[in-house]
Amino acid sequence: MSFKIDVQPAGLSFQVNDETILAAAIRQGIGLPYGCKDGACGSCKSKLLQGTVVHGTHQHKALSEAEEAAGLVLTCCATPQSDCVIEARSVPGAGEFPLRKLPVRVISIDKPAADVAVMKLQLPANMPFEYHAGQYVEFLLRDGVRRSYSMANMPHTGPIEASAPPTMELHIRHMPGGLFTDQVFTTLKPRDILRIEGPFGSFFLREDSDKPMVLLASGTGFAPVKAIIELMRAKGIARPATLYWGCRRKADLYMHEWARQAAAELPWLTYVPVLSEPQPEDQWDGRTGFVHQAVMADLPDLSGHQVYACGAPVMVESAQRDFSTRCGLPEGEFYADAFTSEADKHEED
């Protein structure tokens, strides 16, 4: 059964064939906002103006019963039962690059922190892979299982030379017992072959704006923010940007020197590391507490800013709520990618 979906106010239309609204949009290159694709983060929440849908499994924190009763839907787990009209922000560029499945070869796995691996992958020279800095890929594992990680480097540009095939950098936090991360931290080795699909996600720099930016990261949420900084450097984008990176202790700032060096070299970039639980051995004299509260202390008026937030769901949710209600951040200027683990996706309130 095929149904038509109209997206307002963008005036976009597409067909859905026994699938979720978001799956159909991604398949056809229609740019809708989304993050986890699993009903956990709420990034794809939209207003159903006409028609009916059936929701699959999702978390109440992503869509409450009251919100559903008010006509809100999660496009990632809403299957249409009729033609529908939805109100959603279109995301120019989100569907710009074709989805590709391709093999990648492990080049190296370094561990800058006890529970963080920086994995570099070689992409096939004969299969161009385009993406926006900030987007993510999914590893295709056995039995249809997938795991998602953001690219930590800007996309390759220019001609591909056989002597220097394009590479991809990922930052992977070890989740003990994790199907994929246990493998990364134990048996995976250079020259191993993996399969990925992408690019996915609507978290990337809106280059049509010149507003000053807050780049807000917690933990390995630093990865896509690093890619955005690399892109800005390469393109000569000089919008003022302040990077706030929150971790528990100093060892968790696994690329602290990279961030310090970038801020020293780029006049438009400021770096503010924040530790929530510094240890005596850290000898930390920098900022402490919750990272989004450090932003609010420095920038009590965010009405003229854009915010790009990436990391733990609780950080992203707190920042979005507090920045809008207490700092005047316009609703449409908060862009986020909540790093939902498999545990996050399956827990219920």
Image (cartoon, rainbow, N blue to C red):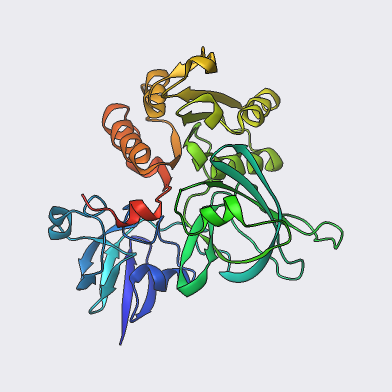
In-image side of 40 versus 202 (left or right): left
Q: Is residue 311 above or below residue 59?
A: above
Rendering quarter of residue 292: top left
Whether residue 337 is visible, yes or no, is yes
Q: Is residue 345 above or below residue 332?
A: below
- The spot of residue 225 in percent (x, y) is 55, 40
- Residue reaching furthest right? 163
- The spot of residue 307 in percent (x, y) is 44, 37
- The spot of residue 1 in percent (x, y) is 30, 87
Q: Is residue 172 above or below residue 346?
A: above
Rendering quarter of residue 302: top left
Q: Residue at x 66, y 69 (%)?
A: 103
In-image side of 64 versus 1 (left or right): left
Whether residue 241 is visible, yes or no, is no
Q: Residue at x 79, y 59 (%)?
A: 165
In-image side of 15 versus 111 (left or right): left
- The spot of residue 115 in percent (x, y) is 53, 40
Q: How many marks?
A: 0
- Residue reaching furthest bottom? 1
Q: Which of the pair 93/133 is nearer the observer? A: 133
In-image side of 112 versus 58 (left or right): right
Q: Residue at x 53, y 39 (%)?
A: 222
Rendering quarter of residue 294: top left
